[in-house]
Amino acid sequence: MSTDFTELRELSTDEVVTHSLVSDVPLSQGRVLALITLDNGRDHTRPNTFGPLGLIELGEVLDEQKARAARGEIAGVAITGKQYILAAGADLSKVGEIPSRSAAKQLAQLGHATFAKLDELGVPSFVFINGLALGGGLEVALNANYRTVDRSGAGIALPEVFLGLIPGWGGAWLLPNLIGIENALKVVIENPLKNNTMLKPQQAFEMGIADAMFEPANFLEESVKWADGVLKGSIKVKRPNEPGKIERAVKWDIAIGIAEKMLKSRIGTVAKSPYAALELLKAAKNTDKKTGFAAEDEKLSELIAGDQFVASIYAFNLVQKRGKRPAGAPDKALAKPVTKIGVVGAGLMAQQFALLFVRRLKVPVVITDISQEQIDKGLAYIHGELDKLLAKGKLSQDDANRLKALVSGTTDKADFADADWIIEAIYENLEAKQNVFAEIEKYASDTAVLATNTSSLSVEQIGAKLAHPERLVGFHFFNPVAVMPLIEVVKTPQTDDETLSTAMVVAKKLFKTAVITADTPGFVVNRVLAKVLGEAMHAVDTGTPFEVVNTASAPLGLPMTPFELLELVGLKVGAHVLDTHHAAFPDRFFESRNLHSLAEHGRIFERDGKGKIKGFDKKAVEIVSGGTTPMTADELLRRLEDGLADEIKRMLDDGVVAAAEDIDLCMLLGAGWPFQMGGVTPYLDRVGASQRAFGGTFHTPMLRGVGNS
């Protein structure tokens, strides 16, 4: 390779190298296919990844095959991976250690230089996607001339935008020119921002990412046979979505414009990587490959050397590691078996709970309410949702029938007698919840766990009328229940280890990330958000216009403005949450009479018939008028940042959670705090709020300025 990659070599002495192992496969008519198998020598729990040393080795192996092709020894070259895995992309542990933008650019150039050799061999190149293909794992395939895919393979994706990067080894230029701009936008931007959604092999085949698809039992043999057909000309490859002149002249820019509007409305403008990817996809319309790859080099090196990538890796590690090993969780062996679920209530939240429990735990679920009419309505909703999953092919008819049969309803709480787990989902009223649990305890078995979904009330107080409060635990979901990945598991001073362990095991079986919190107002997510909402309403109450508050809060990167969030949760609910926090912490959380008036009015925004915001409602503006001490956006932003730093430090000092990482995990998964911001506490360190609020930082300096840049 012509570029000197000495600096990268020196940084990679401890790299787990993915080796490129060559074997010759005989084809028809005396031809030979050189088959390169990527293998890091570890079992399937450690996927193949590309670090500098692995890339250099692959490049050298490809050079050898080019020389063999020139000598007429081989008719083609193919790459596949070890069992179930092609490659999971770049070795992020190595990328995270890149010390400079110049070294980052070398890494981008090394990936391009290596993968580009697949189109310069002098013979056709193939990649047999035999399993997981993420990031650089998919990009090595895109650089080849032809691709096959295993029908049963694991996810296929370009998740870089999710991690604060862009597809920088050819993906941003090659993909839109292979499958069209709309499909490329889906893969490169939309899917990563949709909980890092991956393509299934069938989808990749239909898009045209793969040219052929084979069953897993004979995938490699069929792929080799297919490649043989391509080489001898008996198989002609047609790609259904390659962009033509009309798409490039008209549809391309329109699709880019729509995507840009979508990004601004969904995530604002703080996160850099989605817009960098959008810029590269736009330019791919009319640039050649060399120009496109050079642009990827620049963007990738800029992002690797920036703060948001470090923040994203911190956030990614929280979810992948800390989220799977929750702090303070008792031994899971203490968990009680859960063979039947009771749900108190049949309203919307209760319906969502029942649906989730029956789908994930596959045990009998009984819902109860005061009227048979409400129960019938709840059961109809659950059956309807199961029918939707059946129609989408996510359930078989037998599974749908079985799950429906597991859900029942009753007005008699005595039917909870054999339930192992009983969760209430009634309205937020302390006395009502106390009475419900006191009544349930008359019927529940001595070993049943009792759970409450309260979002703002004291769990300990909810259990005040229980004879056995040690079996009560908070189990706070976020709406929509099926989608939001976080559960706050609230431990009271009385909650015993068996109950807490059961709650953590149940959360895992629901495919949720659970964080243990102390029993304190708002727990984690609502307390942090209450600080933001309280400061926003205080600013409005004292004369700051709605628009200025929106401008001030934008750098936090939250998925919606404070006022959109208030309307989403419901203005009356928001007022109740702020009142609860004001009562608990009157010196730090403001009471807002205007918010109660807005709740009575019913809205803050004026919307069109489709619900799109047109502006602020005139009556809402009138309700909050009268303040005489408005703030500027800069003044309010500093007040928000310093207030958050102070409140979170108090939460940690009071032991609400074990560490700052748990605050960040909750905000990432429960409030949509952007991964590119790395969570709230690194952001507060970055902007100096931690230093201003308590004279320190939440993290060590190695998280080099994680946050906004």
Image: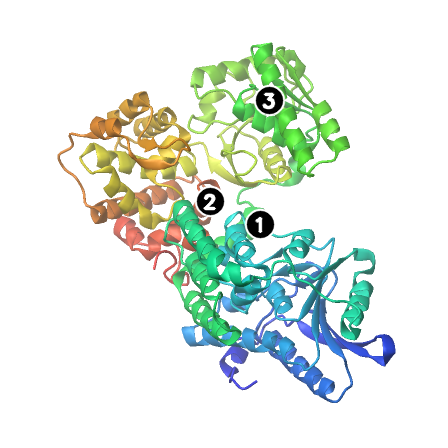
Q: Vertical placement of 601 versus 646: above or below?
A: above
Q: Find numbered disc 1 in the image and state the secondary structure of the residue it sits on.
A: loop
Numbered disc in front, either 3 or 2: 3
Q: Find numbered disc 3 in the image and state the secondary structure of the residue it sits on.
A: strand
Residue 658 image label: 2
Residue pictured at 16% horizontal, 39% vertical: 630
Q: Which circle's residue, 3 or 2, is located before the other in the chain?
A: 3
Q: Which residue is mark 3?
A: 343
Name which residue type carries label 3.
Val
Instruction: Mark 3: give few (<14), some (14-19) or many (20+) Cα within 10 Å.
Output: many
Q: Which circle's residue, 2 or 1, is located before the other in the chain?
A: 1
Image-based side of 457 in relation to 485, left or right? left
Image-based side of 430 in relation to 390, left or right? left
Residue pictured at 46% horizontal, 68% vertical: 300
Name which residue type carries label 2.
Ala
Instruction: Mark 1: give few (<14), some (14-19) or many (20+) Cα within 10 Å.
Output: some
Q: Vertical placement of 20 versus 316: above or below?
A: below
Q: Which residue is mark 1?
A: 197
In the image as oriented, which residue stretches furthest toward the left?
628
